């Protein structure tokens, strides 16, 4: 067995490209006859396909610890949405993604494109080899392996389509990505978005059929019958095939949609591989631990920036305010933290209890981006017993008896008053001041230290959703599909099919698990300025799947603009859901070698 594994690893390492072109030029690989003679080799080759989702692969003859499929898939998706903000300029590709100014020459554009087609080629090799044998000769185990490869091919094509082409809801006939359903790479042309999605549906249906009578080979790092069906519900939703989505979700969820939800939200990131909630995850082990190169390192650092993680990407204020409607939300409590808050309490104890800081986005005169104004209070000298400790902190402000907060910023006195304002945060109360003659929304939050918890004027609102596996703060096996999504996929389909009560019922399944108020009916939602049940569902999806590479696609397929008017380095701008800027550029070398057309607006 070991010798076959070593052979597989050697051979898969021999796959090569011409430059950065997506097409493989095979110098050596495992042949179909080898598979037929040694069926067990299909296990190793399929495991190899899975591994490419998380491994650091040699690209252009070099490896870069910052380039992995899972890291780029998450960051490129999330920074196009409205849940994550970047706190400073960085050499990371996350900066260009946040600013919508990616170019065809950027290495992260090259790598994700290349990696996806490398995975697809591996899956196609396995499919062709396994299909040489009859179903009888393959048996249930062989069928299951074949189904896994159809699933892998479908997922990689879907990721490519999401990143490099417009969403299906904007038109079937828009240019899609290059569709690969065999190892024959003699012809390279872009299919339409509709053609790509049609093939993804076929692959997932085939995958489910092949895996139906088999057993998942291990933990949730392996695809399964339900994983294929779960991804298919997402694809149907993206295609506006709402009745098909609803029917399949009904089959999967049965009479108890909460049955497969994990009650341990705080512990979920550490055990996604074994949790009943996970339909499929990209599995990692301690040997995959990469510290500051991990996918979660930009979101979290247990000891501040420059430590174990980078900790430079934070929750946006609008997302935080959505959670603060019900601060007891278990999701918020599990994954949200303000770096420096606990340090301040540990150092100064009750002295800072109840004090608040105030911040809000303002124009940055130095460059056309936005930054935060911080009004944290009067700096108070506080001699401490040892020179190693800081000798001063910002005390912040204690709210007035009426709940308002009076403070001074740049020599001017302000009074932040909490009130409801139509059209803002669905009518939930927020704080406002009069700033430069205009009523301005401000955020009154827990205090942090002036020397910890602030980066470039931005409070460090960390996300620990990708942390804690095997005791490593930077290790995770991110869930790509989970049962909560099936519940909310059904809710969205119900909303679009005018099944309002059913949609509210499914939303309440998720809210119940989160430990927050459950809607009585849609009439109650209307008291919070909801005009349709779809927006209720989308808000719940935003909270449930924040930082899970779903938000921009939720907005775009529902033809909702992407609002980037929040603090951060990104331009202060609202992006139309159908604008060309949203789609990433196809790599320049691919265009040069194969001659396929570039995306509109990306022909730099």
Image (spheres, rainbow, N blue to C red):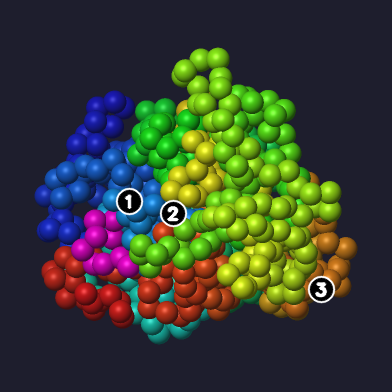
Secondary element at tag 1:
loop
Does the CB distance between marks 1 and 3 fall below 8 Å? no
Closer to the camera in the image, 90 or 141 = 90
| Nearer to me, 473 or 85 | 85
Q: Main secondary structure of the magenta part?
A: loop
Quadrant in the picture for the C terminus: bottom left
User: Which residue is rendered at x = 60% and y = 31% of the image?
Assistant: 344
* Cβ atoms under marks 2 and 3 closer than 8 Å: no
The numbered mark at residue 526 is: 3
Res 399 seen here: yes
Q: Residues within 10 Å of mark 1 (few under 14, many from 20)?
A: few
Is 13 placed above or below 381 here?
Answer: below
User: What residue sits right under mark 2 in the picture?
Assistant: 86
Dot 2 surroundings within 10 Å: few (below 14), some, or many (20 or more)? Answer: many
Q: Badge 3 local density, few (<14 within 10 Å), some, or many (20+)? A: some
| 62 is within the stretch colored magenta | no
For marks 2 and 3 on the same chain, the one whose residue lies earlier in the sequence: 2
- Please give the range of residues in magenta: 101-109
**Label 3 element class:** helix
Give the residue at mark 1: 90
What's the CA distance linking mark 2 and mark 1? 9 Å
**Farthest-out residue, top:** 385
Q: Secondary structure at mark 2?
A: strand
Where residue 341 appears, as percent x and y from the top left, is 60, 35
User: In the orientation shown, which residue stands out farthest toward the front?
Assistant: 411
Closer to us: 94 or 270? 94
């Amino acid at each position: 067995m070991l010798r076959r594994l070593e052979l597989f690893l050697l051979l898969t390492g021999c796959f090569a490209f011409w430059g950065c072109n997506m097409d493989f030029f095979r110098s050596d690989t495992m042949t179909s006859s080898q598979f037929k003679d040694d069926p067990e080799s299909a296990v190793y080759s399929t495991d190899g396909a899975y591994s490419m989702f998380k491994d650091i692969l040699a690209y252009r003859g070099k490896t870069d610890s910052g380039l992995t499929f899972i890291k780029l898939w998450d960051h490129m998706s999330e920074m196009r949405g409205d849940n994550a903000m970047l706190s400073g300029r960085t050499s990371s590709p996350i900066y260009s993604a946040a600013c919508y100014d990616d170019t065809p020459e950027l290495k992260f554009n090259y790598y994700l494109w290349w990696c996806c087609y490398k995975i697809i080629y591996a899956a196609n090799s396995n499919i062709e080899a396994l299909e040489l044998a009859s179903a009888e000769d393959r048996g249930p185990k062989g069928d299951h392996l074949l189904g896994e490869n159809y699933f892998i091919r479908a997922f990689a094509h879907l990721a490519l389509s999401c990143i490099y082409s417009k969403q299906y809801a904007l038109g079937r006939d828009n240019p899609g990505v290059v569709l690969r359903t065999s190892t024959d790479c003699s012809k390279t042309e872009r299919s339409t978005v509709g053609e790509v999605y049609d093939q993804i549906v076929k692959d997932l249906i085939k995958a489910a059929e092949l895996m139906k009578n088999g057993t998942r080979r291990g933990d949730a790092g392996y695809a399964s019958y339900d994983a294929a069906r779960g991804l298919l519900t997402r694809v149907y939703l993206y295609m506006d095939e709402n009745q098909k989505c609803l029917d399949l979700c009904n089959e999967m969820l049965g009479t108890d949609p909460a049955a497969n939800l994990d009650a341990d939200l705080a512990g979920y990131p550490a055990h996604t591989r074994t949790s009943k909630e996970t339909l499929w995850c990209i599995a990692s082990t301690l040997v995959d631990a990469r510290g500051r190169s991990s996918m979660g390192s930009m979101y979290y650092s247990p000891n501040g920036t420059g430590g174990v993680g980078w900790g430079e990407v934070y929750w946006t204020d609008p997302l935080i305010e959505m959670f603060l409607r019900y601060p007891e939300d278990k999701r918020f409590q599990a994954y949200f933290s303000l770096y420096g808050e606990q340090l301040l309490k540990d150092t100064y104890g009750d002295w800072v209890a109840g004090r608040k800081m105030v911040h809000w986005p303002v124009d940055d005169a130095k460059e056309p981006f936005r930054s935060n104004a911080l009004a944290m209070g009067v700096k108070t000298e506080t001699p401490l017993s040892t020179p190693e400790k800081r000798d001063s902190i910002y005390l912040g402000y204690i709210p007035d008896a009426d709940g308002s907060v009076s403070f001074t910023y740049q020599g001017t006195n302000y009074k932040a008053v909490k009130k409801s304002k139509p059209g803002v945060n669905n009518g939930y109360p927020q704080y406002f001041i009069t700033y430069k003659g205009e009523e301005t929304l401000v955020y009154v939050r827990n205090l942090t230290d002036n020397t910890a918890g602030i980066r470039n004027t931005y409070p460090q609102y960390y996300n620990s959703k990708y942390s804690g596996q095997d005791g490593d703060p930077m290790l995770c096996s991110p869930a790509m599909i989970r049962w909560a999504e099936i519940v909310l996929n059904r809710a969205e389909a119900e909303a679009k099919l005018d099944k309002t009560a059913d949609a509210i019922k499914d939303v309440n399944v998720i809210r119940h698990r989160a430990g927050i108020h459950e809607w009585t009916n849609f009439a109650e939602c209307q008291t919070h300025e909801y005009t349709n049940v779809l927006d209720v569902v989308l808000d719940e999806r935003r909270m449930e799947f924040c930082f899970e590479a779903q938000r921009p696609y939720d907005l775009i397929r529902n033809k909702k603009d992407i609002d980037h008017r929040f603090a951060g380095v990104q331009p202060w701008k609202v992006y139309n859901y159908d604008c060309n800027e949203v789609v990433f550029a196809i790599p320049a070398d691919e265009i040069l070698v194969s001659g396929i057309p570039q995306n509109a607006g990306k022909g730099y």
